[in-house]
Image: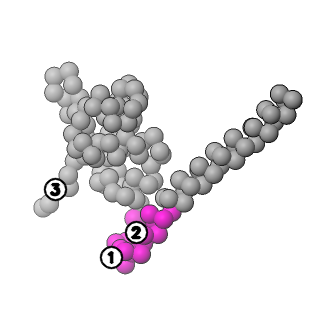
Amino acid sequence: MIKDQTLTKKPSNILEKIEESLERLNDKMEVIIEIQKNGGDNQKSAPALPDAPLDVMTLLSMPDHLRKTAMAICRCSRATAEEISQHTSRARAVESAYLNQLVIMGYLKKERNGRKAYFYVEKETQG
């Protein structure tokens, strides 16, 4: 009897995970379609450049773990890994690794002030 419950539970868990993934994909596709409807002719689709700002398309192209960190830094504008970890509910060390990865990718800038490292999105300079 216990084996029967385990067998029936496993496929339903798998189906639930598939459903969650499909819902996330559907949400992302709706955002992309909305962007194309509203600004399709005015903006040409171009691959994200390393020094490009964190726009919607750039965020959507990122893996989920990096997107969560990038969105948190956008909300804070300038923060340490500790401050970002409070927003994302992940460990400081994990956030530090993700933030440094975004710096290497060219999406964020890093500045040291004493022992603390501050991460931020560099605003586009007009000129």
Locate the N terminus and report the quarter of the image it occupies: top right
Q: Amino acid at mark 1?
A: Asn
The disc labelled 2 sits on which kind of residue? Ile
Please, is residue 103 above or below residue 22 in the view? above
Q: Which residue is mark 3?
A: 125
**Quadrant in which the C terminus appears:** bottom left
Q: Secondary structure at mark 2?
A: helix
Residue pictured at 41% horizontal, 46% vertical: 67
Report the residue marked by disc 1: 42
Mark nearer the N terminus (1 vs 2) = 2
The number of numbered discs placed on residues in the rendered structure image is 3
- Badge 2 crowding class, 10 Å Cα cut-off, few under 14, some 14 to 19, many 20 or more, is some
Cα gap from disc 3 to disc 1, whole angstroms = 21 Å
The secondary structure that most of the magenta stretch takes on is helix
Residue 35 horizontal/vertical position (percent): 40, 68
Q: Is residue 3 covered in magenta?
A: no
- Which of disc 3 and disc 2 is earlier in sequence? 2
In magenta, the rendered stretch is: 29-46
The alpha-carbon separation of the residues under discs 2 and 3 comes to 24 Å
| Left or right of residue 41: residue 12 | right
Find disc 2 in the rendering and name its residue: 35
Classify residue 4 as left or right of residue 96.
right
